Image: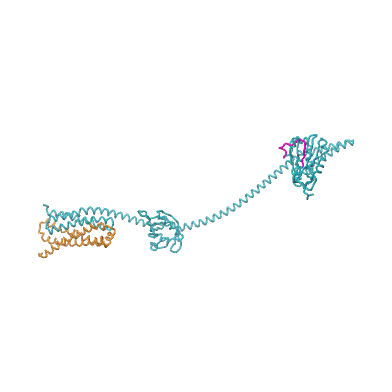
Chain colours: A cyan, B orange
């Protein structure tokens, strides 16, 4: 049998312990509205109610059955139940509560820091829900726009945006609905109606299922920056205008320079031409000094000798012979001087041609008469074959005569003794062609153009042998081309040369 | 104490004990049966709205336990002193009656609170 006093002792001891445990319930009960604690409290409640049943049963046993020992045993069970079960549950829950509280504290501190951060940041903070309604702003946002927090909370964000930027905001909101963070520049309308340029960096707020729940944005006032950019743009435009102006000036200067260079190039060409002319003149001068002086001296010497002989010769026949010699020498000298004067005047451009209609046939016959004696001395036969019924040309008679004479003179001079000279005329379109065939030395193909250059000698020894200054053919070319005609030379079937002269035929109105 | 008075007192004591046992069973059954309904968010909010009643019920439920501890300690002391405990026994019965009456009020309050939490009201 269990002693009653011992049972009493245990009942009191367990009751006291249970009371102490129950005290732990107080802090737990304070957090009962917390969802997690609330759910766990059901176990505690059931244990308490079960212990109450034992408690009440114990008293029923005592007061109905008057069994003190069973009553105390039931009380002991009731207290043990309260003590053991509640102790386990309460301690566990108390620890969880402490953790929950600590977590809550951390969360509260974190929230406090977050709020502090938002409130103290230099930029505006703006949070909206999925319907664009403003849910949170910081003080800086209120300052920037001039509205109070109460005036902004619960309002559509577009109500504060310049209508011109509504589309931009909507587009970016659509992107945020797709989970994208965006940054863009817009203008807000401040409470006083003025505009505020701002850079908005917005981030979407998504729940655990990635559903769009709104977004928050950091709003930076860039009004000053925009103003500066405007000024920079203005400066840039001014600068561009200046550059454009300078570019135009430079282009103009470049054009002037190019024109100047063109002028210089022209001047250079002129100078080169002048230099060539000077070179020719210098060559002419040198030639005259070295060669013409010799050519001039020869007839003078002959004439001087002939005059001395005339003075000494008593017989009139012999004197006559020397006089003829003297006359020839003077004629030669005269021809030479005439040629020099003519070519000089042509080169200077002072030669004046007087064109008129001339009968070329009679002119050729006159020229043949002049060389007839010289040709006869060397047994050279001169034949003229006019092959045309109309032989009138429009030209300067003096020039054409000089040309024809010079060609015939050369044909005789460079012909073989007993040779032949044939002159043939024919019409070719509007021109009259005169061909001078000779049976002389001939001219190699490579010299056929050069022979018309002034003072050109194919072989200097030939000059010594046949005489001549190299002016004759140059004069021919100058005179013929001066009459709008042309002159060229070709081979006479390996037996000499053919000089061709082409002159324009006179029109009926010229007659 | 007169017989008739003693009888009434003991009848009251026994009634209080039986009533508390019954109320405890009712409350236990109600909580066990409506456990899921009581765990809902609405029930939690209902509790949040009736915290005064909650604290009152808790106080009324715990007070009898404290009283019980007190008179059990006194009974133990008397037992250990080996003296005459008849006077104390009468006083103890009075204390037990009072404790069970308080407990009954606490249980009734708890049933009402549970009804408010899990019932039609919130």
Q: Nearer the viewer, residue B40 or A134?
A: B40
Tag count: 0
Quarter of the view holding residue B75: bottom left
Q: Position of residue A322 (x, y in %)?
A: 86, 37
Judge whether A242 appears above or below A368 on screen: below
Q: Is residue A321 visible?
A: yes
Q: Which residues are magenta?
A: A434-449
Q: Is residue A348 visible?
A: no
Whether A435 is among the magenta residues is yes
Q: Is residue A237 left or right of residue A279?
A: left
Quarter of the view holding residue B20: bottom left
Q: Which residue is at a point 38% across and 62% down the rendered structure image?
A: A154
Q: Nearer the viewer, residue A38 or B74?
A: A38
Judge whether A199 appears above or below A384 on screen: below
Q: Position of residue A162 (x, y in %)?
A: 45, 61
Quarter of the view holding residue A186: bottom left
Q: Position of residue A335 (x, y in %)?
A: 80, 41
Q: Which residue is at a point 59% across and 53% down the rendered structure image?
A: A249
Q: Position of residue A181 (x, y in %)?
A: 41, 54
Whether A458 is among the magenta residues is no
Q: Is residue A111 left or right of residue A289?
A: left
Residue furthest right in the image: A315
């Amino acid at each position: 049998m269990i002693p009653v006093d011992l049972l009493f002792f245990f009942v009191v001891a367990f009751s006291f312990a249970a009371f102490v445990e129950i005290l732990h319930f107080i802090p737990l009960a304070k957090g009962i509205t917390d969802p997690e604690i609330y759910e766990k409290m059901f176990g505690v409640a059931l244990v308490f109610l079960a212990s109450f049943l034992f408690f009440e049963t114990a008293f029923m046993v005592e007061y109905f059955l008057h069994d003190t020992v069973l009553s105390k045993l039931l009380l002991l069970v009731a207290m043990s139940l309260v003590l053991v079960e509640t102790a386990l549950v309460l301690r566990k829950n108390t620890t969880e509560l402490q953790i929950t509280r600590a977590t809550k504290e951390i969360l509260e501190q974190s929230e406090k820091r977050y709020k502090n951060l938002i409130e103290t940041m230099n930029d505006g903070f703006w949070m909206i829900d999925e319907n664009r309604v403003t849910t949170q702003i910081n003080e800086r946002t209120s300052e920037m726009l001039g509205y109070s927090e109460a005036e902004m909370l619960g309002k559509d964000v577009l109500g504060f945006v310049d209508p011109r930027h509504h589309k931009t905001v909507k587009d970016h909101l659509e992107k945020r609905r797709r989970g994208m963070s965006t940054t863009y520049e817009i203008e807000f309308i401040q409470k006083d109606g003025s505009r505020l340029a701002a850079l908005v960096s917005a981030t979407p707020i998504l729940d655990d299922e990635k559903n769009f729940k709104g977004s928050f944005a950091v709003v930076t006032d860039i009004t000053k920056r925009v103003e500066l950019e405007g000024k920079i743009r203005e400066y840039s435009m001014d600068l561009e205008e200046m550059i454009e102006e300078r570019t135009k000036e430079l282009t103009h200067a470049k054009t002037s320079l190019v024109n100047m260079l063109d002028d210089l190039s022209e001047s250079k060409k002129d100078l080169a031409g002048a230099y060539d002319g000077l070179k020719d003149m210098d060559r002419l001068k040198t030639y005259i000094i070295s060669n013409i002086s010799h050519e001039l001296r020869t007839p003078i010497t002959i004439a001087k000798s002939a005059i001395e002989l005339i003075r000494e010769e008593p017989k009139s026949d012999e004197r006559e012979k020397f006089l003829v010699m003297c006359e020839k020498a003077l004629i030669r000298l005269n021809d030479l001087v005439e040629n020099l004067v003519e070519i000089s005047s042509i080169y200077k451009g002072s030669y004046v041609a007087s064109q008129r209609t001339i009968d070329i046939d009679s002119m050729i016959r006159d020229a043949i008469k002049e060389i007839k004696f010289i040709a006869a001395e060397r047994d050279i036969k001169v034949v003229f074959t006019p092959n045309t019924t109309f032989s009138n040309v429009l030209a300067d008679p003096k020039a054409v005569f000089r040309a024809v004479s010079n060609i015939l003179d050369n044909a005789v001079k460079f012909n073989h003794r007993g040779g032949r000279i044939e002159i043939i005329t024919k019409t070719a379109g509007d021109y009259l062609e005169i061909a001078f065939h000779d049976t002389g030395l001939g001219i190699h193909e490579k010299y056929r153009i050069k022979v018309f250059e002034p003072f050109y000698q194919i072989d200097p020894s030939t000059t010594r042998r046949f005489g001549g200054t190299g002016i004759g053919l140059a004069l021919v070319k100058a005179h013929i081309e001066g009459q709008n005609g042309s002159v060229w030379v070709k081979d006479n079937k390996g037996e000499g040369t053919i000089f061709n002269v082409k002159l324009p035929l006179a029109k009926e109105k010229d007659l | 104490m007169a017989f008739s008075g003693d009888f009434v007192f003991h009848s009251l004591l026994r009634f209080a004990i039986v009533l508390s046992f019954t109320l405890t069973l009712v409350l236990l059954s109600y909580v066990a049966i409506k456990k899921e309904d009581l765990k809902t968010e609405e029930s939690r909010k209902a509790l949040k709205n009736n915290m005064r009643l909650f604290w009152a019920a808790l106080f009324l439920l715990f007070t009898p336990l404290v009283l019980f501890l007190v008179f059990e300690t006194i009974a133990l002391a008397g037992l250990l002193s080996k003296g005459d405990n008849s006077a104390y026994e009468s006083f103890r019965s009075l204390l037990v009656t009072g404790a069970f009456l308080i407990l009954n009020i606490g249980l009734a309050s708890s049933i009402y609170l549970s009804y408010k939490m899990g019932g039609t009201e919130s």
